[in-house]
Amino acid sequence: MMKETESITTYEVLINQKKFTVNTKNLTGNAIKGFVNSPDDYSVVCQSKSKDYYIGNEQMVDISQPDRNTFFTFNPATVEG
């Protein structure tokens, strides 16, 4: 049982332009895809002000860090290379 003085820290993330509130600071690529029901074979990208970078399925992202809370999922087969 939680004491009245204890509080749960929450974090806001934006995934495919939808806002979610989570109570953990670490998310994997698979967890991010799960919020928006993206298929397993989709890719996850963290969009930051300096650059965008891919997040692996099992890779942890610390969303409490600055500029690490906006994500997009997409079908990699639709990206021209």
Image (spheres, helix red, strand yellow):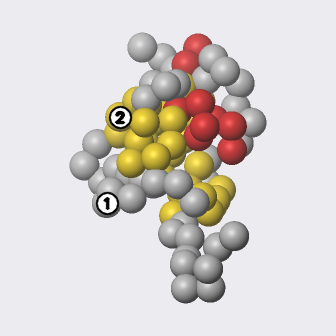
Percent coordinates x, y for residue 25 in the rendering: 46, 54
Note whether residue 66 is visible. yes
The residue singled out by tag 2 in the image is 53
Left or right: 8 in relation to 34: left
**In the image, 37: left or right of 10?**
right
Which residue occupies the foreground of this view, 81 or 10?
10
Q: Which mark is drawn over residue 66?
A: 1
Of the numbered discs 1 and 2, the one sitting upstream in the chain is 2
For numbered disc 2, what is the local secondary structure? strand
Q: Amino acid at mark 2?
A: Tyr
- Considering every residue shown, the one lying at the far bottom of the view is 5
At 55% from the left edge and 78% from the top edge, which residue is drawn? 6
Work out how far the residue at label 1 is from the one at label 2, CA to CA, in angstroms.
15 Å
Q: Mark yes or no: residue 78 visible.
A: no
Q: Identify the element where label 1 is drawn.
A: loop
Q: Residue at x 62, y 62 (%)?
A: 21
Above or below, comparing residue 32 to residue 17 in the picture: above
Quarter where residue 74 is shown? top right
Q: Quadrant of residue 19?
A: bottom right
In the foreground, 32 or 26: 26
Nearer to the camera, 51 or 67 = 67
Q: Which residue extends farthest left?
A: 50
Residue 15 placement (x, y as % from top left): 59, 49
Nearer the camera: disc 1 or disc 2: 1
Left/right placement of residue 60 relative to residue 40 reads left
| Residue at image coords 55%, 85% | 5
Reply above or below: 70 against 52.
below
Which residue is pictured at 28% across the width and 42% down the height? 51
Image location (x, y in percent) of residue 2: 64, 73
Q: Where the C terminus falls, by quadrant?
A: top left
